[in-house]
Image (spheres, rainbow, N blue to C red):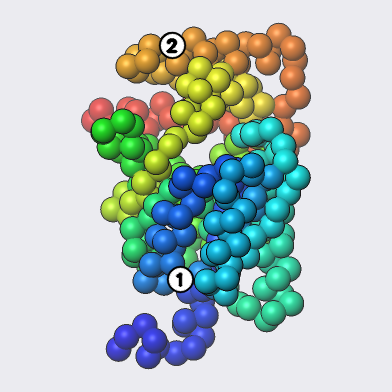
Amino acid sequence: MTERDKPLEYQKSRQYIVVTACKNEGDNLPNLIQSIASQTLKPVLWIIVDDGSTDNTPEILKEAEEKYSWIQSIRLEESKRDLGLHLAGMVRKGFDFAINYCKKKGIDYGYLANVDGDLTLETTFFEDIIKEFEKDPELGLASGGTKHIVGDRIIKAKLREDEPSGGHMLIRRECFEDCEGIPVSYAMDSVLKAKARIKGWKTKRFEENTATEIRDVGSAEGYWKGFKHGGKTDYYLNMHPIHVISRSIKYSLRRSGYGGIAYLMGYLSSVIRRDKQIDDEEVKKYFWNKWKSSYKHCLLRRK
């Protein structure tokens, strides 16, 4: 029996919507659009939020909307590139629009996906991950593995199997609603994963399903600025100093060498200024204690 021959309710349960926030992604969007259009299981709706792009992104989106009925775009006023609250707000707007659109049109869906604008996905990416959700009703968030193209090299990200990547993350609808949608905060994907775990949902990455990131966050903003932003974000999330020191050492041991310094400077500058931290006490407590689970994970790997 093929997927098309299976009952309608089963097919509806596999339907998903996608949101992509982008800015000046004219070089990358055509590849992403082609990879999603080539999916063995296509989305019922894809909302692309354009953050006031000044390149040819609007023209690419217009052409895509004309070609595919399930693609729609939202254009915001031009603003400075921002990986914090502004980005989270963009993604939230995209999901709010998509959910309201589905309500008006009577479109059902079982999953919601956040996909970055500089990715390409394997053709079975969404179908294979949805199969994993169907195997485990407690799975709330999941992603594939991530590959980065750096010069003439392809580098695969090394992350724990319970740490899905926010840039190509699929979320079960019940989990999404349980967590009250996308949090408008720094590191929105980290906060969403924390809220899901607090609510009792599992989170996982499936390395065999690959998303290739042509340009990573660090290169988009400059590696120094990227690591510094990471330090500020970890202060915002209320990471324990033990966790911060451990990360700064790990980043310092990388090829660039200066990542740990930039990261620590970002964290300490927020400490000195007494910057605002996340106001969700449950999430705040979760990140304060996260170093313990990371330490346990390291011990288990060494056994």
Q: Check disc 2 and report the residue beneath it.
A: 258
Q: Check disc 1 and report the residue beneath it.
A: 42
Instruction: Tell me where residue 197 appears, x and y as whole percent.
Output: 55, 47
Label 2: few (<14), some or many (≥20) within 10 Å? some
What whole-number distance in Å separates the C-alpha atoms at marks 2 and 1?
42 Å
Instruction: Tell me where residue 139 appears, x and y as whole percent.
Output: 47, 58
Residue at 45%, 71% (x, y): give it: 42
Residue 67 against residue 164 in the figure, above or below: below
With 243 as the anchor, is 59 left or right in this view? right
With 139 as the anchor, is 279 left or right in this view? right
Instruction: Tell me where residue 18 appears, x and y as whole percent.
Output: 55, 61
Q: Amino acid at mark 1?
A: Lys
Q: Amino acid at mark 2?
A: Tyr
Q: Secondary structure at mark 1?
A: loop
Residue 201: assigned label = none
Instruction: Tell me where residue 38 appears, x and y as whole percent.
Output: 38, 67
Q: Secondary structure at mark 2?
A: loop
Residue at 43%, 37% (x, y): give it: 215
Q: Circles 2 and 1: CB distance less than 8 Å?
A: no
Label 1: few (<14), some or many (≥20) within 10 Å? many
